[in-house]
Image (spheres, grey):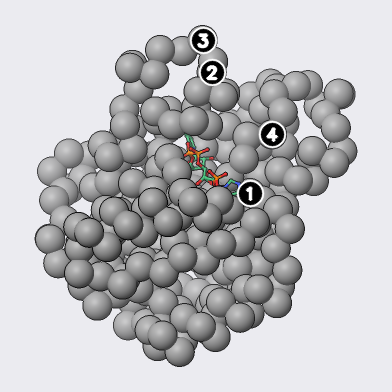
Amino acid sequence: MNYKADPELLKNRTVLVTGAGDGIGKIAAQSFAKHGANVILLGKTRTKLESVFDTISSETNTNPIIVQIDLANAREEQFKQLTVAIEREFGRLDGLLHNASILGSKVPIESYDTTRWKNVLDVNLNAAFILTRELLPVMRKSRDASIIFTSSGVGRKGRAFWGAYAVSKFAIEGLAEVLAQELENTSNIRVNSLNPGGTRTKMRAQAYPAEDPGTLPMALQHMALYLYLIGPDSKGITGEKFDAKTWEGF
Ligand code: NDP
């Protein structure tokens, strides 16, 4: 991979990351801040967000903000208030990384619990839709803004027992495609999907308990692609599907 982000790639930019307290989202938030972004850390568990906040505050001169929201039960009103707060604090939003997800159950469709199914769709899909819709006006104020939807291999080809998770990722790909087309000639907002592929995190360990985590790449190894897509170097790229495993930079 030969893309190397400029150390000031995201200077004076504001980026929101969902699921910023752990896993890939945490590393992405820290990486964006290291490249100059003011990062809005959205997540469920306050203590985890505080720990990311402390790391960013001690390692950078940026202004991180914590937004504790449980995406399973989020109310539209919370997203509306968030949009108002972002506009007041930063004037605009330049990047949005939809990263938060839950795995749900790994069982056949035939025995998938209805409440669980809806819960997965709420976190992985519905919250991303509502958050995006509410944030679009403040993203339109950016010279060039980027939305990344996090997908998965099972969101591009179905696999037995991945149930609501796989379905939510197919839907995320659809949302990304529809939105990319709608915004292509009417805004400076680009929209792409990104499949990080097998990565050493809690979710991966939950999905593959027998796997040796040492065989997997760490989230840090994907950051060139995350930085490329969230920052201005990817201006003009929209409606594309990226795969961290096969991306070679340029
Ligand atoms: P993790 O489980 O490690 O982290 C998920 C993050 O999402 C956590 O910060 C978690 O917060 C947050 N989150 C979960 N539920 C909610 C909620 N209800 N409200 C707000 N935040 C929530 O997952 P990964 O880092 O592995 O995954 C990141 C993304 O990458 C996901 O979209 C996943 O589908 C995708 N992906 C991951 C792969 C992998 O191998 N790791 C492979 C392919 C795709 P908290 O810790 O507080 O619960």
Q: What residue type is labelled 4?
A: Gly
Query: In whole angstroms, how far apart are the C-alphas of marks 4 and 3?
Result: 18 Å
Which of the two discs, 2 and 4, labels the residue nearer the N terminus?
A: 4
Query: In whole angstroms, how far apart are the C-alphas of marks 2 and 1?
Result: 20 Å
Q: Residue at x 53, y 18 (%)?
A: 208
In the image, is 62 to the left or to the right of 116? Answer: left
Q: In this figure, which residue is indicated by the disc labeled 3?
A: 210
Q: Which residue is drawn at 26% across and 37% down?
A: 221
Q: Is mark 4 on a helix, strand or loop?
A: loop
Q: Is mark 2 on a helix, strand or loop?
A: loop
> Is the shortest distance between ligand 1 and the CB of mark 1 under 8 Å?
yes
Query: In whole angstroms, how far apart are the C-alphas of marks 4 and 1?
Result: 10 Å
Cβ atoms under marks 4 and 3 closer than 8 Å: no
Q: Would you place residue 158 above or below residue 31 in this image?
A: above
- Is 146 or 213 nearer to us in this picture? 213
Query: Nearer the observer, disc 3 or disc 1?
Result: 3
Q: In this figure, which residue is indicated by the disc labeled 4?
A: 104
Which of the two discs, 4 and 1, labels the residue nearer the N terminus?
A: 4
Q: In this figure, which residue is indicated by the disc labeled 2?
A: 208
Q: Which amino acid does label 1 sit on?
A: Asn
Residue 102 image point, x, y percent:
62, 40
Q: In this figure, which residue is indicated by the disc labeled 1?
A: 124
Q: Would you place residue 91 above or below residue 29 in this image?
A: below
Residue 190 image point, x, y percent:
41, 68
Residue 64 image point, x, y percent:
35, 68
